[in-house]
């Protein structure tokens, strides 16, 4: 079978993966597969320490976190911008999408794009674990 015009993702999972949409990743197998395709702002390393992924770092002022994004690209070659991150987060929070993972962001009250590589997320109250979520 010729797949030269397509990007193919092969993942060995005997039980099957019900979705590759991160908004609906619930079980461990799906979360692992989705993690191979998408980066979050941060990730937890093998010692459960927060490490940068899309974000190079952040500044916390009160309940607002300002994230600086690294120069990263989608598989298509298009540069990832703060607007893309905002879209992804707002999609998770959208009641019409009904993501089972929306609770992770339930304290988010506002998402502002400051420029192409800077994003500010305001919480309704301080939450120290937020960057690792």
Image (tube, rainbow, N blue to C red):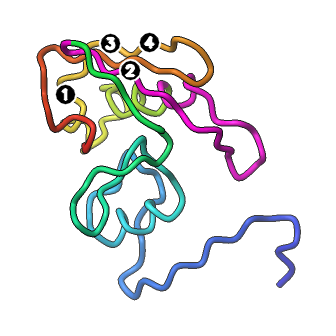
| Label 4 or label 1, whichever comes before in sequence order | 1
> In what element is the residue under mark 2?
strand
| Label 4 or label 2, whichever comes before in sequence order | 2
Alpha-carbon distance for marks 1 and 3?
11 Å
Q: Where is mark 1, residue-wise?
A: 106
Residue at the (54%, 59%) spot, across then down: 37
> In what element is the residue under mark 4?
strand
Q: Where is mark 4, residue-wise?
A: 112
Q: Position of residue 114 (x, y in %)?
A: 52, 11
Disc 2 + disc 3, Cβ < 8 Å: no
Name the side, left or right, on which 129 lies relative to 67. left
Alpha-carbon distance for marks 4 and 3?
6 Å
Tell me where residue 41 sits by quadrant.
Answer: top left
Q: Position of residue 112 (x, y in %)?
A: 44, 12
Specify few, some or many for label 1: CA neighbours under 10 Å numbering under 14, 14-19, or 20 or more: few
Q: Where is mark 2, residue-wise?
A: 66
Above or below 127: residue 112: above
> In what element is the residue under mark 1?
loop
Disc 4 + disc 3, Cβ < 8 Å: yes
Q: Position of residue 79 (x, y in %)?
A: 71, 36
Q: Position of residue 44 (x, y in %)?
A: 29, 57
Alpha-carbon distance for marks 1 and 2?
18 Å
Specify few, some or many for label 2: CA neighbours under 10 Å numbering under 14, 14-19, or 20 or more: many
Specify few, some or many for label 3: CA neighbours under 10 Å numbering under 14, 14-19, or 20 or more: few
Q: Which residues are magenta?
A: 62-86
Toward the viewer: 24 or 65?
Answer: 65
| Label 1 or label 2, whichever comes before in sequence order | 2
Specify few, some or many for label 4: CA neighbours under 10 Å numbering under 14, 14-19, or 20 or more: some
Q: Where is mark 3, residue-wise?
A: 110
Tell me where residue 80 sits by quadrant.
Answer: top right
Indicate yes or no whether the magenta region holds residue 72.
yes
């Amino acid at each position: 079978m010729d797949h030269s015009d397509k990007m193919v993702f092969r993942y060995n999972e005997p039980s099957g993966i019900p979705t590759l949409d991160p908004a609906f990743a619930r079980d461990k197998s799906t979360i692992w597969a989705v993690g191979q395709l998408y980066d979050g702002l941060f990730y937890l390393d093998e010692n459960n320490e927060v490490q940068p992924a899309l974000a190079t770092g952040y500044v916390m002022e009160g309940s607002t976190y300002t994230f600086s994004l690294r120069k990263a690209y989608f598989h298509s070659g298009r540069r990832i911008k703060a607007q893309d991150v905002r879209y992804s987060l707002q999609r998770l929070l959208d009641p019409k999408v009904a993501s089972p993972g929306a609770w992770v962001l339930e304290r988010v009250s506002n998402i502002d794009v400051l420029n192409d590589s800077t994003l500010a997320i305001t919480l309704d109250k301080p939450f120290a674990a937020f960057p690792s979520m």
